[in-house]
Amino acid sequence: MLHSFTGTIVTPLQQAKKQLSLEEVIQKEKKWDTNNPNSKKIDKLIGEMIALQNLPFSFVEGLGFRRLIQELAPKYNFRGRNFFTDFVCNELYIKLAAKVKELIEKYDYKSFTTDIWTDPSSGVSLLSLTCHGVSENFERSSIVLKCETFDDRHTGDIIAEKFNTMLAEWNISNEKVHCMIRDEGSNMKRGMRLALLNDLDCTVHKLQIVIRHGLRSQECIEAVKQKCKKITSHFNHSTIAQKQLEKIQDRLNQSHLKVFQDCVTRWNSTFYMFERFMKIKDALSLYANDHNIESILPEEWKVIECCLEVLKPFEEATREMSSSQALISSVIPIIQMLLKKLDVYLTKPRESDSIRLAVSNLKSQFSAKFSSLEDNNLYAISTYLDPRYKHKFFKPVTEEKIKDEIIKMVNDPVVPDSPKSPAEKTKRMRMGDSLDPEPGTSSMSKKTCLKSDLAMMLGSSSEDEGEGEPDNSSPDALLRKELVIYRNKKRLDLDENPLNWWKVNRCEFKILSKLACRYLSPPPASVPSEQLFSGAGLIYNPLRNRLEAEKAAILLFIKYNSPIFNFNY
């Protein structure tokens, strides 16, 4: 037994504990080995943070970051940018790619969206490939597969070569490509044709082109648009003007709303600019009275009001089809609804002949651009297999042709849209014109929203009588029976998920449910790929403008795919 200087008795056990605590202090100061599980976990978190937050690899060498890690994990052994460059671009990417491959193998058929993006500061060009699929469990997901770099011009021949390379890398045969959604660029169209891939125009891009031309067709609309852009520029270039506008809004007991900038590449930005001008109309008028800017005349306010009335359904349709949950099956119903809205507008007396001419021109271009939707199996069959719509948007003769195509496809899955046969690919079944307005739908309210308009169309006539039982002696009796039962079932509400419906009813429709997985996989637009490249713009920020294209592609892959797996890979 020992005695301390203070006279306290120290037992041997207490002495041992004291010595042990000294050893713990020494151990505490020792850094983790690189293979320590805690160290590897932090490596992964840092690597993912670099991708998720668009950070440069040199970020890990910054003083602020190192002080933070030192405080949170003092035993972590710091790594430099070279380690994380290799770690992210190799280890993380390889592990995540394995999970992605495992997921897409669950899709019997795969749909894709694609887009090309060029960074003006670095000159880097990327071609994206985003995969969309529905599993046997009717779970739909979108996965970024690849961003291929361009070293040459974006010709159709090079695009075709890039697509073949990307698909081969993921072991995806052309026969398993259901369709590719792309923009309307001639190089993209040629690339798809050379690669023998089923392709469709991005519906949102087509709407963009039609409406942009429609707005430009009448000088009065273009003049008002340019005046609004000039007023917008006045406020955007002067904080003093913005503050004065806010003071006027305060006097009027209005919320502080700024003007909205029009963008030449987005027609809906013109809609939002006009919409904002109407909301702050009084404040703008008072501001113009006291300042040296052009005021908007009463007849010009009327033009803005008419444009908003015409374009509101198109804006809602654009938003709906740009949604991450949107299905290609909604394209035919939405397009028919928009045509009906234009017809309704033209039947009403109007004060302005120029607006009427603009709407008439818009309808002509719209009809020409979307006249062949029902001629394409990819659109028609998907709409028919959506339990929200079924046969409702098709005439009887069209419906029969769709069912014939379904039966033909089940008997020989390669026939309808085979990329192996260009002749078959370009040959489209004529299904008749089902775009004529139905009677009894001309009194739609101008304030109804998109789904209300669709619901009105779906309920515009009484339910068709159910079909009788098919001939059981037919070799296709089982499939024909499924088609009859499916048609006779009550349609799903517009707000409900059609994939959930198929999941619940797949045992009853063993043949049709497999087709539904395939035909309900594509989105209506290439928006997912465009959104991917909005992230690419962030990746090439001033801190990373020297980033190599291959590394940028890998960072995008990790950024968009790792959250899908909840970072477990």
Image (cartoon, rainbow, N blue to C red):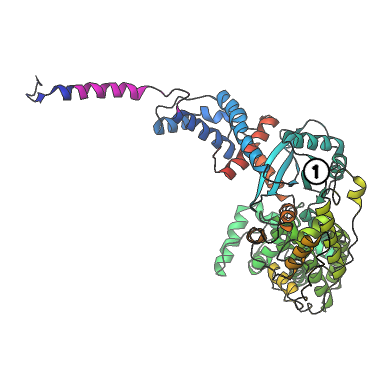
Circle 1 sits on which residue? 175
Residue placed most toward the observer, 351 or 373: 373
Rendered position, 102 above or below 204: above
Relative horizontal placement of residue 208, taking residue 426 as reference (left or right): left
Indicate the quadrant containing the C terminus: top left, top right, bottom left or bottom right: top right
Residue 339: x %, y % from top left = 81, 68
Relative horizontal placement of residue 137, taking residue 364 as reference (left or right): left
Under tag 1, what secondary structure?
A: helix
Rendered position, 302 above or below 424: below
Mark 1 belongs to which amino acid?
Glu
Residue placed most toward the observer, 12 or 229: 12
Numbered range of the magenta stretch: 16-36
Which SS type dominates the magenta stretch? helix
Residue placed most toward the observer, 26 or 288: 26
Relative horizontal placement of residue 334, taking residue 102 as reference (left or right): right
Q: Which residue is rendered at x = 69% and y = 39% of the image? A: 145
Quarter of the image for residue 337 reads: bottom right
Asked if the stretch drawn in magenta spans residue 26, the answer is yes
Residue 216: x %, y % from top left = 84, 60
Residue 40: x %, y % from top left = 49, 29
Indicate the quadrant containing the N terminus: top left, top right, bottom left or bottom right: top left
Quarter of the image for residue 251 reads: bottom right
Asked if the stretch drawn in magenta spans residue 130, the answer is no
Quarter of the image for residue 283 reads: bottom right
Q: Residue furthest left?
A: 7
Asked whether residue 57 is in view, the answer is yes
